[in-house]
Image (cartoon, rainbow, N blue to C red):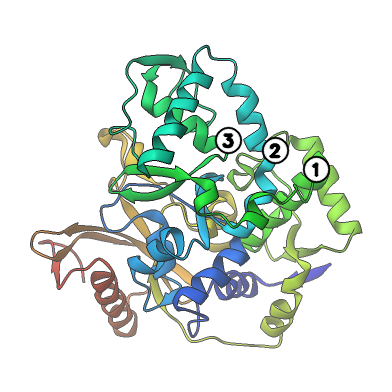
């Protein structure tokens, strides 16, 4: 068992995520290095000041631009969109690991009368005409259908035939997202974009337990430090109940793939991937990294386990975009603000594309944070970078916002 002070635990997490000290991720190679560390980037289409995955990357990757992620997805094809923790972005090399879900989707789609005929028509159209969206695919009518993509919200309702066919073919792996135009998805044949050797590769973990071990270890790496407790970090690892999770933690310990950690003030044992031991040792040697200020995304893997963030950083965060306005404490798209080894507060920023202005609607500082000139200079610098990231030229502070 390795013992860490609260400050050491904070430093470990922030350094692992590239949110403290000098930037360790640079350019498109940095994006690929970070996604190999985390396993996936959670995707969400809401874009008031950048989409979730984009905001997450701009905080870590020096001089990140939105086009970098777009190119890796739809030009270089080193990344692809697929379900992991909700709808996500994954390395294309992970394609074989999700074969069981594509197989399940194939069998599930066959339960709906008419689905196979719709699939055949959609595939024939794409082979003849190329990438297509559901609004352009000429399939008439609808189908009472429940999407294999479990977060799509289709429910057991009548869905447009074109949408049902494309989503079903996407969930079975016959189609991939060719590109997106705002929130509209255009689909094309997977064989046109996924290398043959990856497309035909067998599932590396056909055994269910081994597959769950792989996914659980991956989620520990995504956050960096995690406990064996119910957590949003485990979302969509199918069949992972409390008993199964405990057995997998035991197995990973026996295989020396994880190391137990005791953090000051936290009664539950936490775990790191064994590969992170060297970073722990560096921190325990007395490293004092240079502070940075960053805004991070609402679905950032760093804060997937909100109870853990509360326990280590004494910071509570809720994404209030789906909270009824009368029940909101802050605002619909308030995102966390980090300075140094602490969460300094939260900020609400909105991009005005017409005037190329980033509007700072409000900043709420934590009561425990002492506002210094040095911190304010860092915040100003951070928001200037955030303005550039959002393709804006001006920063406008809404009247009454504390600076």
At mark 3, the secondary structure is loop
Quadrant where the image shows the N terminus: bottom right
Q: CA distance from mark 3 to mark 2?
A: 10 Å
CB-based contact (under 8 Å), mark 1 and mark 2: yes
Confirm whether residue 9 shows in the render: yes
The residue under label 3 is: 172
Quadrant where the image shows the C terminus: bottom left
Question: Is 30 drawn above or below residue 52 in the view shown?
Answer: below
**169, 191: nearer the viewer:** 191
The residue under label 1 is: 206
Where is residue 179? Give x, y as percent: 37, 51
Where is residue 7? Give x, y as percent: 60, 74
Confirm whether residue 296 shows in the render: no
Where is residue 297? Give x, y as percent: 41, 58
CB-based contact (under 8 Å), mark 3 and mark 1: no
- Which disc number belongs to residue 100? 2
Crowd around label 1: few <14 · some 14–19 · many ≥20 (10 Å): few
Nearest-to-viewer mark from 3 and 2: 3
Q: CA distance from mark 1 to mark 2?
A: 8 Å
Q: CA distance from mark 3 to mark 1?
A: 17 Å
Crowd around label 3: few <14 · some 14–19 · many ≥20 (10 Å): many
- Which disc number belongs to residue 98? none
Residue at (28%, 82%) from the top-left corner?
A: 377
């Amino acid at each position: 068992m390795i013992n860490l002070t609260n400050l050491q635990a904070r430093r470990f997490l922030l350094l692992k995520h590239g949110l403290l000290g000098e930037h360790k991720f640079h350019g498109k190679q940095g994006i690929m290095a970070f996604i190999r560390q985390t396993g996936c980037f959670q995707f969400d289409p809401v874009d008031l000041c950048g989409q979730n995955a984009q905001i997450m990357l701009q905080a870590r990757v020096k001089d990140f631009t939105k086009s970098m992620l777009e190119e890796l997805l739809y030009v270089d094809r080193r990344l692809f969109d697929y379900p992991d923790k909700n709808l996500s972005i994954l390395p294309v090399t992970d394609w074989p690991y999700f074969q069981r879900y594509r197989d399940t989707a194939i069998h599930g789609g066959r339960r709906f009368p008419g689905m196979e005929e719709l699939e055949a028509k959609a595939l024939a159209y794409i082979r003849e005409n190329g990438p297509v969206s559901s609004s352009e695919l000429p399939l008439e009518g609808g189908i009472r259908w429940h999407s294999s993509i479990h977060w799509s919200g289709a429910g057991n309702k009548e869905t447009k035939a074109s949408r049902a066919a494309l989503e079903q073919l996407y969930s079975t792996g016959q189609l991939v997202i060719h590109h997106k135009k705002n929130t509209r998805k255009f689909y094309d044949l997977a064989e046109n974009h996924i290398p043959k050797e990856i497309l035909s590769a067998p599932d590396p973990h056909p055994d269910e337990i081994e597959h769950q071990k792989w996914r659980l270890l991956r989620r520990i790496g995504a956050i960096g430090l995690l406990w064996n407790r119910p957590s949003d970090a485990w979302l969509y690892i199918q069949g992972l109940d409390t008993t199964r999770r405990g057995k997998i933690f035991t197995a990973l310990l026996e295989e020396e793939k994880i190391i137990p950690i005791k953090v000051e003030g936290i009664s539950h044992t936490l775990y790191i991937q064994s590969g992170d031991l060297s970073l722990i040792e560096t921190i325990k040697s007395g490293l004092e990294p240079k502070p940075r200020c960053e805004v991070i995304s609402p679905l950032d893997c760093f804060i997937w386990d909100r109870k853990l963030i509360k326990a280590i950083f004494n910071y509570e965060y809720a994404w209030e975009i789906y909270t009824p306005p009368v029940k909101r404490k802050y605002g619909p798209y308030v995102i966390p603000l980090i300075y140094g080894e602490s969460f300094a507060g939260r900020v609400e920023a909105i991009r005005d594309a017409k005037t190329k202005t980033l509007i700072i609607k409000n900043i709420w500082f934590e009561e425990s944070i002492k506002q210094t000139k040095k911190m304010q200079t860092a915040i100003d610098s951070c928001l200037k970078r955030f303005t550039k990231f959002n393709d804006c030229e001006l920063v406008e502070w809404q009247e009454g916002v504390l600076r």
